[in-house]
Amino acid sequence: MSRAGRKRYRFKPRFFVIIGVLALIVVLFVACHLGGSGDGSKDGGSSDKKAKPAEEKVVSVNVTCAGDIIGHSPLVDACRTDDGYDFTPCFRYVKDIIQEADASICTFEGSMTEPPYSGYPMFRSPKDLAKSLKKVGFTSIDIASNHSADNGRSGFDSTIKTCKDAGLIVAGEQENEGDPKYAMVDTDKGVKVAFVHYTYNDGSVEQPTVNGIPLDESMQKRCNTFYMGDKEGSVKEIAEVCKAAREAGADIVVVGFHWGEEYQLKANSDQQKLAQMVVDETDADIIFGSHPHVPQQYALLKSADGSREVHCYYALGNLLSNQRQENIGNSAVEEGVIVRFDIEYDKEKKEVKSIKTKDIPYWVDLYNNKYRIVPLRGDYQGNDTLKASGHLERAQAAEKSLYDILGKDKN
């Protein structure tokens, strides 16, 4: 065919417009789906507005529990300074353990008041003790004990106010009638821990007494007491307090008891029965005890219906006191265990997924008028205090003794 016979095609302008639009669509598709970092940024760089990370559903919470602090006169005198009292050096080696906790608690026996101070049998300790406990890392303090009424209503009220003024969350006693009978710690993890603490009543249901001292009407309403002669009634009240704590937002509930027989290394039958009733009839997650001045056995208690297990430490021992082998005739008063409960909590489902325990055994060294709580873990043979005092063998004996008492292996 001649060139003259060929038909010539002319493209209309709108054809080029359509082609251009299609090309632009292809370019945009490639840029959005194949290029860059997938977040609209160029060359894989980050955009100015980053997506907010999703909140963790399961968080790890550390709840740490420690034993009794008793203001014997030699201990208080040893902590005197030029301008008051400072107990923080006693915690030199364990304060990091306490400070690591999201919620931590110890038990205090006696009153924190103005001077004059006194030791056994009517304990009056300096108010600086509360400041020291806060400084070393405790978030909370249990003050319900058989020495709660040592100094009457004034000592009772002074102790509550002193601890609160120091920034400690008070468990076991209330400042005002009608205040909650639980102590709530709102942790930085967004998980709330409730401490529900009770001391034994050695009087009667109608007239509670501690160490034979009757509680007046106001103290009866503001001191958490239980009566072993009425375990059913006591557990019913504790269950109601646990329930109230849950309704107030508690995610973890710890029940503490001031109970048992002094210097006995094994929990008695009343303690064991009461603990089992708490497991069966409340939703407590943890149980631990104080008062015997020595550690007692550990048990993993199962509920009657088999639905759950609860860690129970019947007694943790003295954390800081002047009770010694030399004056008591029982070396176990010098040793104890700080327990760290590592809890996995599901914030979405609002349930505890698991609880693991870590035992930190310790021995309290007294040398050159200095009291030091020495943790018996790692290479403690090189501890400065033990090297200076020459008490390493006593510390090693305490470590062995403690695990024998607990009935547990090292963890």
Image (cartoon, rainbow, N blue to C red):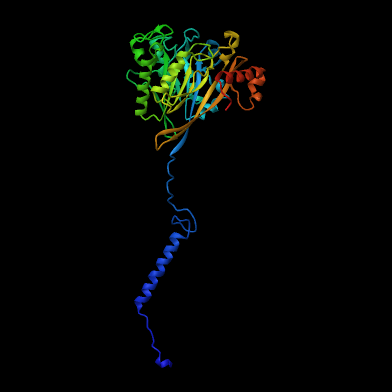
Q: Quadrant of residue 238?
A: top left
Relative image position of residue 11 (x, y in whole percent):
37, 80
In this view, 394 is above or below 203: below
Q: Nearer the viewer, residue 262 or 304?
A: 304
Residue sitting nearer the eye, 310 or 186 = 310
Asked if residue 372 shows in the view, the reply is no
Q: Residue furthest front?
A: 305
Split into 4 quadrants, where in the image is the N terminus? bottom left
Q: Is residue 49 left or right of residue 323?
A: left
Who is closer to the viewer here, 242 or 136? 242
- State the residue at coordinates (41%, 15%): 158
Q: Using residue 375 as the reference point, say whether residue 162 is left or right of it.
A: left
Q: Position of residue 381 (x, y in %)?
A: 66, 24
Decide which of 283, 307 is in the foreground and name it: 307
Percent x, y for residue 369?
60, 14
Whether residue 239 is visible, yes or no, is yes
